[in-house]
Image (cartoon, rainbow, N blue to C red):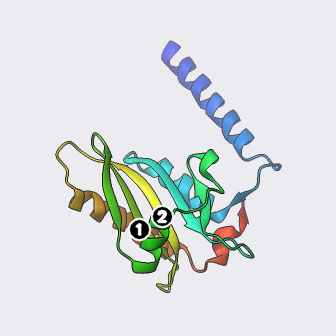
Amino acid sequence: MKTRFAAALILLAGICSLAQAQSPSTKKIYAQKLVDELFAKRNDLVSMGIHVTPPGQPDNVIIASNVPSKIGKKSSDDDMGVMRTGTPLIKLKGEDVYDIVLPIYVSSGKTIGIIGMNLRCKKGEGEASALKRARQIVAGLKRRIPSEAKLFEEVR
């Protein structure tokens, strides 16, 4: 009985915080929805940022992230190199966490920016395996991005 009551309280708290996060005064774009959905499904993601040049802006910036303070941060020269060349950046960031930067595409295959992510790996999992999982994430996003403009559309 106590367990059900505690579970009900936790559920209610979650619903209240979700309602606050989606209040009408908080505008969310499609790119952020994609990030939020990935974090809801995957426990191997530590952090993620989608970098694209917003309409009418000169610079590629983080437009969506699970770390709100990163949104709006300009992409580094190394990040832009990944976008230009298509060559991924990967480095071991901490114990069993790889920092991976890959190009991101619209469904037609056009490169529109980059995605940076920190992936938690199983003990002993190597760089190649982490990169393969990161590419699977990018492929899944590619199927869901019909155009660059779609990333900036407001969603609920």
Question: Foreground: 128 or 26?
Answer: 128
Which numbered disc covers residue 91?
A: none
> Is label 2 in a helix, a strand or a loop?
strand
Amino acid type, callout 2 = Ile
Q: Residue 39 location, x and y as percent?
A: 49, 49
**Taking the image as drawn, is residue 111 in sight?**
yes
Distance between mark 1 and mark 2 Cα atoms: 5 Å
Give the residue pinned by disc 2: 115
Question: Foreground: 34 or 98?
Answer: 98
Kindly give the residue lying farthest to the left in the view shown: 124
Instruction: Work out whether mark 1 precedes mark 2 in sequence or the reverse, and give the earlier one.
Output: 1
**Taking the image as drawn, is residue 1 in sight?**
no
Give the residue pinned by disc 1: 102
Q: Is residue 2 above or below residue 99?
A: above
Q: Is residue 150 above or below residue 17?
A: below
Judge left or right: residue 85 versus residue 66: left
Amino acid type, callout 1 = Leu
Question: Foreground: 138 or 128?
Answer: 128
User: Badge 1: how crowded within 10 Å, few (<14), some, or many (20+)?
Assistant: many
Q: Are marks 1 and 2 in contact (CB under 8 Å)?
A: yes
User: Badge 2: how crowded within 10 Å, few (<14), some, or many (20+)?
Assistant: many
Q: Name the residue located 39 percent from the left edge and 77 percent from the top edge.
A: 86
> Is label 1 in a helix, a strand or a loop?
strand
Q: Where does the C terminus fall, quadrant-wise?
A: bottom right
Number of marks present in the image shown:
2
